[in-house]
Image (cartoon, coloured by chain):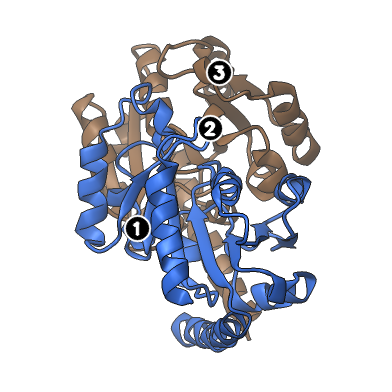
Chain colours: A brown, B blue
């Protein structure tokens, strides 16, 4: 009994995701879906990336959380247009939620839209939002075994950012073991080691992102 | 269309959870459901707690993961009876999964059973497994805003363990802000600050746990 209903929901989501994708293309905005465990540093990645953008590239943010507007307040305080989605208990964003947030953003004025998903290393990977790129953020304190334990999320990534890399040694984090785990489920996705706190490692990630923006036109 | 099906699943789960509860009571084993974000340190909490138990109390472990048997191998290497549940993509354990794991454990020989849920700060809170106590593990690197962003999980806790407390300063973690967030959604649950790595703070938590074991008889 469960499966057909779930399939209906996913196919309804896919229809709205396609509409979102068309909306983003018309507005010429590149959209990133940031997914990660709670506290891996999605908001920090957004702020550090936005700060490193060339001046002519204008970012915007959709924040997804079960509750609260903590992250939206932080982002807005940096002068970045931001809108909060509260899922009210739902464990992931879906395409209709994203669609409902779009009228609150100056989409035509934006070049790059970050969608910060609910902190969850499982469910968000199953819901297409209409974003161009899936950015999976892992972090040193979570441990190097995450790709082996949460293969679906890492398989869904277009790029993997390993954050809090200033603390790799503190957490005895084996980068090569982590890298092999990512490659096992996703041989295509590049991986960048960053520390949003220290700013280390941001350049290769920014180059990759700007190259994608160029290609997207 | 979605709601009745979800309700059916939850009520089927509740029936099996009640059966599990009766099984645990008959075997005189106290059962903990450990829930947390990925990488918060659930396995470390299990190992540190098991190591601190009086010799006559025999622990066992059920490990829940989407994939891999990494944690079960670690636990078994410590001489603790352990069984792995792979959910195959499912974002939480449910009562039937736990029931199916029980024949692999020497339940009559155990006094304390740890069930390590899938790393997820949302979905596991909605599924009764038949456990006596819900133990929510948070960790310093995740940040002090988690109770505000994931209220459902913290509301479900019988006790909150704040792990990796040797790193509170590194992460500029505001313990009082965190504590207020927990109390807002769950005024009853005690909170203990621990570091499984350094061993700091384990005593008050062990006292609380052993008191519960005494009460459970």
Which residue does the numbered mark 2 point to in the structure image? B197
What distance separates the C-alpha of mark 3 from that of mark 2? Answer: 33 Å
Near mark 1 (Cα within 10 A), the count class, few <14, some 14-19 or many ≥20, is: many
Q: Chain of mark 2?
A: B
Q: Position of residue A199 (x, y in %)?
A: 44, 12
At 34% from the left and 43% from the top, the residue drawn is A63
At 52% from the left and 19% from the top, the residue drawn is A167
Instruction: Evaluate whether label 1 is on the same chain as label 3.
Output: no
Near mark 3 (Cα within 10 A), the count class, few <14, some 14-19 or many ≥20, is: some
Please give left or right for residue A67 compared with residue A139 in the image.
left
Q: Position of residue B150 (x, y in %)?
A: 35, 54
In terms of secondary structure, where does tag 3 sit? helix
Residue A130 to residue A183: above or below: below
Q: Which mark is residue B154?
A: 1
Which residue does the numbered mark 3 point to in the structure image? A205
Q: Position of residue B30 (x, y in %)?
A: 54, 71
Instruction: Evaluate whether label 2 is on the same chain as label 1.
Output: yes
- Which quadrant of the figure has residue B101? bottom right
Q: Chain of mark 1?
A: B
Please give left or right for residue B212 compared with residue B39 in the image.
left
B217 and A44: which one is in front? B217
B17 and A145: which one is in front? B17
The mark lying in front, picked from 3 and 2, is 2
A122 and B160: which one is in front? B160
Q: Chain of mark 3?
A: A
């Amino acid at each position: 009994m469960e499966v057909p209903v779930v399939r209906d929901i996913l196919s309804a989501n896919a229809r709205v995701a396609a509409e979102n994708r068309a909306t983003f293309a018309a507005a010429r905005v590149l959209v990133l879906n940031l997914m990660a465990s709670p506290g891996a540093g999605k908001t920090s990645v957004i702020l550090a990336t936005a700060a490193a953008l060339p001046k002519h590239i204008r970012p915007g943010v959709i924040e997804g959380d079960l509750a609260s507007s903590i992250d939206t307040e932080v982002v807005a305080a940096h002068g970045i247009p931001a809108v909060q989605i509260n899922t009210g208990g739902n464990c992931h964003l879906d395409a209709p939620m994203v669609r409902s947030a779009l009228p609150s953003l100056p989409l035509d004025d934006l070049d790059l839209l970050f969608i910060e998903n609910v902190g969850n290393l499982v469910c968000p990977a199953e819901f297409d939002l209409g974003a161009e790129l899936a950015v999976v953020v892992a972090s040193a304190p979570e441990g190097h075994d995450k790709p082996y334990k949460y293969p679906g999320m890492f398989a869904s990534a277009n790029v993997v950012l390993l954050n809090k890399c200033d603390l790799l040694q503190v957490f005895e984090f084996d980068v090569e073991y982590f890298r092999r785990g990512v490659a096992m489920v996703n041989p295509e996705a590049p991986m960048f080691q960053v520390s949003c706190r220290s700013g280390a490692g941001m350049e290769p990630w920014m180059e990759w992102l700007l190259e994608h923006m160029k290609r997207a036109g």
